[in-house]
Amino acid sequence: MIGGLLPVGGNSESSAQAMMRHVGDYTRSEEARVRSAAFRTMLTVHERGSKLDSSVYSEVCLALKDDYEVVREVALKLVWVLGQTYPENMITVAESEEEIRLVDDAFGKVCLMINDLSMRVRTLAAQFLGTMSLVSPKFLQQTLDKKLMSNMRKKCSAHERAWESVTSGEWASGKKWADDAPRELVDAESVSLMSSGSCGAFVHGLEDEYQEVRNASVDSLCSLSLNNLQFAQLSLDFLVDMFNDEIEDVRLKAIDSLTKISKYTVLREDQLETILGALKDFSIDVREGLHKMLSACRLSSKGCLQMCVECLLDNLKKYPMDRRSTWRCLQKIGQAHPELTLPLVPELLAIHPFFDTPEPDVEDPAYICILILVFNAAQHCPTMLHLFEEHTLKHYSYLRDTMPNLVPALKLDGSRRSAELVSVETGTAQFFDSLLAHIEAAPNPRIQEELLEAAQRDLTRLATIDSAVAGAAQFSALYIGSQLLMVKLLSNRLWANPSTLATQQGNIIRNSITQLLQHCLKLQHLFVGLKEEDLAAVKQFKLKALALQLVYIVRASNSSALALCEHFLEQIEDTQRYLIEQGLQPEAFTASVFKEMGQLEDTKPGPVARSLLPLLQVSSPAPPPRPNIAVRMSTAVITEPTGEVDAALKFTAGLVIGVLLDAELCNVRNTATLRVKVKYPDQQTQLIVPKCSDLRPMLLSDSEGNSVTSDTSDTNFRLLTTVLVSHQVWTEACTIDISLALDLTDVESGLGLGTGLTNRKGTVAGVSKAVGDPCVIDLCKPVKVFVSPKPVKRGI
């Protein structure tokens, strides 16, 4: 019934106020559900634009003591809404003459609800605290102190209390000033130990027995700290204490919150000791979160830095897979604390003033950690360069070449080699343009083919030299290579000859067509940042490759072409629709196909192939698209396993063993097609679908190690998963290949040669695929893992 009283458009403001007064009468109903519905109606009306009057605040505050949870919950929302809507209104505190701001009083009421019996109400109160940024600092700071305040009653000085005694008119003995004056009359019913205002609200929230309340308290503490520097410094100890919480999600949230407010705080040794103790956590998310937090924090003393380095090195021995995260952490610490690193250099690098110390192993991860710290600190402290020994400078040159993102460029004077990078204008973009312009200006097909071959070699080399145009060079090189492969196939007349069905030449043609189709899929799915013209060129070339495949299947194969013909016709419609939507003109071959298919009445494979054959025989290669520097190629780098372990992983045949896989993915547009590819020595290949939770967004880093954002930042991920490996008994240990690939079978459902490709078969480990499937595109080179399945031991 109350819901039907909501005002509709066109009602006057006076009628809305009258309706609100009518709804207010129901807030005193004997039925809890009616009271709750009345308050919800008031809240809904406010959300629809009709602001609540501040006069209802006192009545709403009384509802916070209601016996029923549903009433207290909606009353709490109303208190928060009124505090945010009328923050500067002055109200009189109960049992006192003092006036305070409404937002301060509402903040105290919300803090009281942290001690509510209901977990939902406590969670809601903790969430609201973080949004009340207009509260006065004195009330805000009391949330971290459990000492009871005077329940917002005015505190009088000694002089004021004496003056009140004189003016009271009561008789006194004279021995002691106002010794028998009547004391303040206190109603026994009004005394409540829980009426503590905002005192200790966050302390109670952080110590709550429920994870939801603790999470909300940590979030609110972080939000308020970002808006108040003094409060951020006070809340530091409480956030550090949450690192010892029993729930991993709470620990992660505390770590993330401390990372956000780190620019306002400086860590002391006792706080750092608690933080570093959490590095022993088994969860890799917690450890890497701590690395990120330490990277952003500022340390107070040299002892803090030494303690931090020692704990990170000890932790690296226990968890070797954390080395890359530890390296990035020490890089940031060195950049932020050069003055603290300088006095520790002799100890860190084991430099003795009189004796020569042995040269450390530059491949040792712990030694690399120290070098990364010292070199990044030396970037901002030139005095440190004179302390380096000769082998340290050699190690710097080696790490600068192998880890340019972690080791900065240093200015080494005198006899030492200068490592300062000099920016040089390479002119690769102009070279790129001129290369493709020469191809378009070729006088005849033979010269054009020679220019295409030379351009493919040059662009492949250019992609390895200049990273600024690497993506565009790789795209153009792959497009040109696909055109050359198409020309080679069309120049061989055997591709449409039925007599080549069972010959070796027929197998070569079949494999070439498979390779051509895979090139088409790479051009379409392996690059991000393509313009409309680039994608149009790829779609038209793919249409030409499908036409070649269809003619080959119909004329020189005994396989069925019905599904392939249907897929080809769908691609024609898709390409034609795309060109019309983008306002682009089709190429000569594409226009001929559109015309022929429009006039064809019978769309069976035979008539379609007969119409396509003359068009393919007279077709010529299309010029490559104009260079687009924004193009990036999808790549993957597997950092774990490294492929350098000699000891074999032993497991019982028929069972499974988990292999940790840590990889960085760049420019991957569709993660749903990502697969972990496992290839066994018997040539059996499995594609394993990683869990969505194993993919985490990853920020790119520049040459100085600073995190940067780009247009493709949402296509960069880190894959951290466990690959399940299983096989039958082997006579000896062998290596398996683990890599990452894109499985486009679902995307290209109609693509297939019918040449023995196996159907998809679900298994426990993944999906079995044939070796020559064109729909599986590799993202990186495989990493070899040494495994040895052992036979089952029979009991006696």
Image (spheres, rainbow, N blue to C red):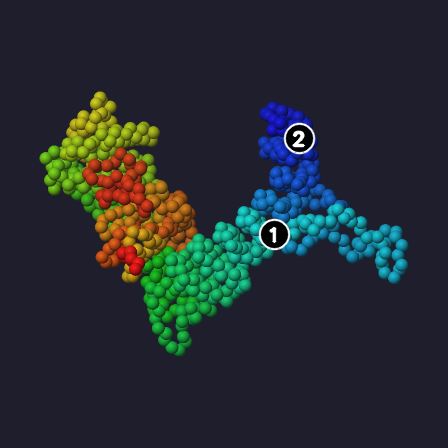
Q: In this view, does 611 lie above or below 208?
A: above
The quarter of the rendered structure image containing the C terminus is bottom left
Figure quadrant of residue 335: bottom left
- Closer to the chain start, of discs 2 and 1, is 2
Residue 549: x %, y % from top left:
20, 35
Question: In terms of depth relative to the viewer, which is nearer, 698 or 70?
Answer: 70
Q: Is residue 659 visible?
A: yes
Residue 94 image offset from top left, x and y in percent: 73, 44
Q: Which mark is residue 23?
A: 2
Helix, strand or loop status at disc 1: helix
329 lies above or below 770: below
Which disc, if any, is residue 204? 1
Farthest residue, direction bottom: 354
Crowdedness near tag 1: few (<14), some (14–19) or many (≥20) residues, C-alpha within 10 Å? many
Image location (x, y in percent) of residue 126: 58, 46
Taking the image as shown, residue 170 lies to the left or right of residue 705, namely right
How many circles with numbers are drawn on the protein?
2
Q: Quadrant of residue 128?
A: top right
Taking the spot 63% from the left edge, 48% from the top edge, the residue there is: 115
Give the left or right position of residue 786, taking residue 341 as reference.
left
Q: Distance between the residues labelled 2 and 1?
A: 35 Å
Query: Disc 2 residue type?
Result: Val
Q: Is residue 265 something one can see in this rendering?
A: no
